[in-house]
Image (tube, coloured by chain):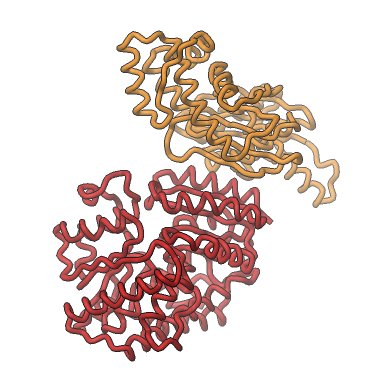
């Protein structure tokens, strides 16, 4: 059985292929102005990595992410909240709290022992606490997103930066730069600012062990440390790239659908 | 008549709720009738009907922005009154002969001052005091406030508002509530007679046209719904909407586009309006009206001491309509509903009712995010 999940996020597209029980990740594809093209590029990468040739080989594909309705080859779409929860639970059944920090939003999801969503919270319109916040700050500091991650844990005197508004925070940072505040202090301040915002979302759903972070911002070690500090609990490492959790969850849902469809047809071997 | 066009009245209600002016208002005015605009559902329409006026509940329908209203308000004021006022400044409420604003929330209250200060030349404007605490004493206070309003209307318009006329208007509005309740009841079945979006239109039309005409129309609608049932729709979850405002179909439409069915609500333009009845046996109709709004139906979240009753009604309604979950909505910067929904969420959880609390603007600027959250919620509560 060949199954696919495609997560078309605001800044990147990701896809996962499941061939029987083998999980194959695609590559992270930067979003283009055409969501359908990004989706195809993300899926093509996963298809190549899996040694397949076309989406026509698939039994079922589920799309997720902000562009989920634009994934033309998907059989169905499911929200990224459900997919991140399903993906993280699939590879770490002990997970009870998920923080997903994506390009344009962040979410906190609470799970039961069976992986059911007990509750979730999502940021409102404001971009503070999202990947976009880091992008804006990295541009102001001219250090790139990698620079924000690389300078983690250096500062002992982090700057205080508003957790409320990306535009105001940007002004604050320009002021700090002009006041000759060292870059590590500013960057640690940025991480703490985002962590403060995200941790309040997490507390609203209830923070419980095990807690994981999904989404691209998990790769920012400074943010992970700041969140650990803000929440006061250990943050577990996922055994697969956390940026693919949405696509993995979509693929897991797709597999469930395909198996159900095969059973309803009385075809226990409905594999290609 | 096919399932998609099964009622002339339903189409009329949709058209009336989608715009501010409508042919019924034009007709009323052409005969010399006066139209009384008002904010908030605790202001009794009965008083205006007894004076011979057509009550029209102010809403922001059709507004595309708040550019003109923002000369008077700031972004820290909730978007509903700003859009309403923007429509007034754009001339959409020039047909009003009077305006009654209640002391519900502060932003609404400031509409009164700004309306008078602005170039909107409504001939009569009145600020009606409404209690912010429930109880017998406050019902007495509200009765006095209603009496003052009655006198002001009589003096300004030369209209005698007799007790007999008031009793007749109470009977008329009770009939409206009862008819609306019957339509709500038709949504309890597995195949609800109307969608949540259609119900918004039905309710909003009721506060936009003469009651006699509306009551006739709604009876015809009920007959249409009985003779031409809606096509059996598959839906994944039965939802209820709770919160302020609700004069538009944004949340219902998004939820129903995601495969759910909104089967009931508790909003200021919806289900709260048809709750119970004003007591027709009380000799003093003003006392009956005050009693109804302060004690029977203290559904404005601003009214302290009445939260337990509000929560009880919401939970009972949710169970009665067999809902799978509740969407709570508040407009950005609305501190009143921010507090109400925060408390309600826990009570709903204890009652075993899943809920999703949403902050939105009157014109949603992030419909994609709203759709994601509502879709995810439906995925967690679906049947």
x 34%, y 13%: residue: A177
Judge whether residue A28 can be spotted in this image.
Answer: no
Image check: B39 left or right of A15? left
**Occupied quadrant, residue A26:** top right
x 50%, y 13%: residue: A146
In the depicted view, which residue is nearer to us: B106 or B197? B106
x 45%, y 46%: residue: B367
With respect to residue A261, does A162 lie above or below? above
Q: Position of residue B308 (x, y in %)?
A: 55, 61
Judge whether residue A124 can be spotted in this image.
Answer: yes
Q: Position of residue A81 (x, y in %)?
A: 60, 39
**Occupied quadrant, residue A56:** top right
In the depicted view, which residue is nearer to us: A49 or A136? A136
In the depicted view, which residue is nearer to us: B361 or B347? B347
Q: Position of residue A21 (x, y in %)?
A: 79, 30
Q: Residue furthest bottom?
A: B164
Image check: B347 left or right of B248? right
Q: Position of residue B110 (x, y in %)?
A: 26, 56
- Could you say which chain is coloured orange in the image? A
Q: Quadrant of the N terminus of chain A?
A: top right
- Could you say which chain is coloured red in the image? B
Q: Quadrant of the C terminus of chain A?
A: top right
């Amino acid at each position: 059985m060949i199954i696919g999940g495609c997560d078309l996020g605001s800044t990147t597209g990701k896809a996962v292929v499941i061939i029987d029980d083998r999980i194959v990740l695609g590559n992270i594809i930067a979003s283009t102005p055409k969501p359908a093209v990004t989706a195809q590029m993300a899926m093509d990468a996963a298809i190549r990595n899996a040694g397949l040739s076309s989406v026509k080989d698939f039994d079922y594909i589920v799309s997720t992410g902000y562009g989920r309705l634009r994934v033309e080859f998907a059989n169905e779409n499911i929200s990224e909240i459900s997919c991140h929860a399903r993906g993280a639970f699939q590879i770490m059944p002990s997970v009870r709290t998920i923080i997903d920090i994506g390009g344009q939003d962040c979410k906190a999801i609470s799970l039961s022992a069976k992986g059911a969503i007990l509750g979730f919270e999502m940021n409102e319109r404001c971009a503070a606490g999202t990947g976009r916040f880091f992008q804006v700050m990295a541009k102001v500091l001219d250090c790139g997103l990698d620079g924000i991650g690389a300078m983690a844990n250096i500062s002992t005197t982090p700057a205080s930066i508003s957790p409320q508004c990306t535009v105001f925070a940007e002004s604050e940072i320009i002021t700090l730069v002009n006041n000759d505040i060292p870059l590590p202090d500013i960057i640690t301040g940025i991480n703490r600012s985002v962590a403060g915002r995200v941790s309040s979302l997490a507390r609203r759903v209830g923070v419980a062990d095990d807690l994981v972070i999904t989404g691209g911002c998990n790769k920012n070690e400074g943010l992970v440390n700041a969140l650990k500090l803000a929440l006061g609990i250990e943050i577990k490492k996922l055994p697969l790239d956390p940026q693919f959790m949405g696509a993995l969850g979509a693929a897991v849902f797709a597999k469930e659908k395909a198996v159900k469809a095969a059973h309803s047809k009385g075809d226990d071997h409905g594999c290609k | 008549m096919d399932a998609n066009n099964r009622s002339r009245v339903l189409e009329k209600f949709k058209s009336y709720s989608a715009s501010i002016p409508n042919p019924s208002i034009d007709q009323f005015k052409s005969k010399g009738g006066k139209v009384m605009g008002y904010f908030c559902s605790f202001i009794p329409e009965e008083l205006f009907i007894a004076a011979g006026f057509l009550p029209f509940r102010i809403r922001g329908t059709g507004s595309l922005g708040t550019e003109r209203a923002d000369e008077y308000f700031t972004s820290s004021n909730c978007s509903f009154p700003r859009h309403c006022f923007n429509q007034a400044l754009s001339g959409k409420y020039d047909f009003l002969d009077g305006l009654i604003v209640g002391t519900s929330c502060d932003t609404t209250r400031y509409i009164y001052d700004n309306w008078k200060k602005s170039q909107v030349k409504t001939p009569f404007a009145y600020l009606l005091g409404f209690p912010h605490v429930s109880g017998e004493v406050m019902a007495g206070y509200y009765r006095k406030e209603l009496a003052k309003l009655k006198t002001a209307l009589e003096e300004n318009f030369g209209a005698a508002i007799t007790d007999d006329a008031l009793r007749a208007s109470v009977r008329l509005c009770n009939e409206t509530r009862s008819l609306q309740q019957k339509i709500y009841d038709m949504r309890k079945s597995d195949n609800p007679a109307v969608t949540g979006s259609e119900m918004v239109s039905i309710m909003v039309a009721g506060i936009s046209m003469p009651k006699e005409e509306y009551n006739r129309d709604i009876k015809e609608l009920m007959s249409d719904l009985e003779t031409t049932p809606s096509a059996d729709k598959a839906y994944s979850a039965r939802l209820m909407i709770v919160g302020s405002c609700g004069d538009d179909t944004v949340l219902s439409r998004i939820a129903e586009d995601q495969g759910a069915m909104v089967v009931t609500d508790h909003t200021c333009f919806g289900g709260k309006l048809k709750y119970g009845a004003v007591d027709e046996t009380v000799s003093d109709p003003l006392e009956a009206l005050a009693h109804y709004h302060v004690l029977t139906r203290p559904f404005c979240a601003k009214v302290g001491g009445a939260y337990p009753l509000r929560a009880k009604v919401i939970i009972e309604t949710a169970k009665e309509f067999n809902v799978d979950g509740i969407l709570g909505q508040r407009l950005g910067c609305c501190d009143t509903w921010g507090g109400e929904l925060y408390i309600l969420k826990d009570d709903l959880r204890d009652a075993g009712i899943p809920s999703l609390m949403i902050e939105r603007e009157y014109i949603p600027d992030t419909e994609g995010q709203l759709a994601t959250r509502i879709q995810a919620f439906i995925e967690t509560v679906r049947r």
